[in-house]
Amino acid sequence: IAILYGGINFYIGNKIRAIIQSIIHINLTIPILVIFIALYTTTIITYYFASYSVGDLVGKIGLYWFGFSLTAFVLLLLSEATAVIIYRGFLRKPLSSTYIVIGLCCTCIIYFYGIYNARHLDVTTYEVSIDKKSAIDSLEIVMISDLHLGYMNDNKYLEKAIERINQLSPDIVVIVGDLFDGNFSAITSPLETINLFNSIDTKYGTYMCWGNHDAGKEFDKMKEFIMQTNI
């Protein structure tokens, strides 16, 4: 897998080198090679040491670059295949490097929109009626999932999410999976995280179930962590 991912990085780096050198006419092979080796290394370290903290900066770079590189690889391949069909199949002309620019632009648009969408807290309201007698006329239930606490989503993100939850004045809060991002050690300030969870203001409590990312070698630490909260 590491070799395959290295090939993906080499493919992307080579395309970026080609388009930059066609503009400024300077040999950038060595600088680009060094940059891509560094990016590749951060990703490999982040995933290889998934049960340890590799540092907030390294972890963030590794995860963000992994997502960007896979997106770029797919879109560059699609744009290159399309360019080959158009230029060599229909126009009978040499392949233009324009496809690299198009592929990279599409990558940036899709990737950064994805980051914005993932970090944007959106509230969707549903009204559910249950034909059942109860002493309680109604319940305000807030359901949240996929917090993925770790390198990418830190305590600042959690604090923002909890502020939004408390603004809704919930009777019950339910966290339906993927509270963690697979690596408990990626949480830099566990005590602060505990205090944030304990600041959730509900009438009947906060409840959660595990998701597929709430697992791995550090699952016991995750369980111990939850036991220290009001969840």
Image (tube, rainbow, N blue to C red):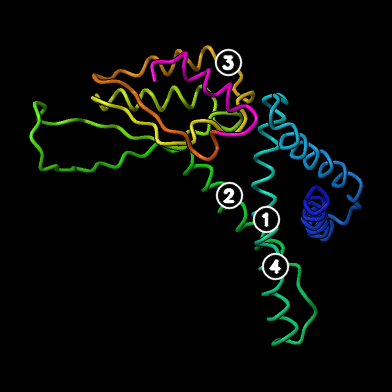
- Please tell me whether mark 4 or mark 3 is closer to you in this view: 3
What residue is disc 1 on?
72
Tell me which label, 1 or 2, sits earlier in the chain.
1
Asked if the residues shown at circle 1 and circle 2 are in contact, with their CB atoms under 8 angstroms apart, the answer is yes
Side of 24 relative to 123 (left or right): right
What residue is disc 3 on?
189
Q: CA distance from mark 4 to mark 3?
A: 44 Å
Q: Looking at the image, which is closer to me, 175 or 54?
A: 175
Label 3 residue SS: loop
Residue 116 location, x and y as percent?
50, 42
Q: Looking at the image, which is closer to me, 224 or 200?
A: 224
Tell me which label, 4 or 3, sits earlier in the chain.
4
Q: Residues within 10 Å of mark 4 (few under 14, many from 20)?
A: many
Q: Looking at the image, which is closer to me, 18 or 24?
A: 18
Quarter of the image where the C terminus is located:
top left
Q: Residues within 10 Å of mark 1 (few under 14, many from 20)?
A: many
Disc 3 marks a residue whose amino acid type is Ser
Residue 29 location, x and y as percent?
90, 51
Disc 1 marks a residue whose amino acid type is Ala
What residue is disc 4 on?
99
As for residue 152 lying within the magenta part, the answer is: no
Tell me which label, 4 or 2, sits earlier in the chain.
4
Tell me which label, 3 or 1, sits earlier in the chain.
1
Which numbered marker is on residue 111? Answer: 2
Image quadrant in which you'd find residue 4: bottom right
Q: CA distance from mark 1 to mark 2?
A: 9 Å
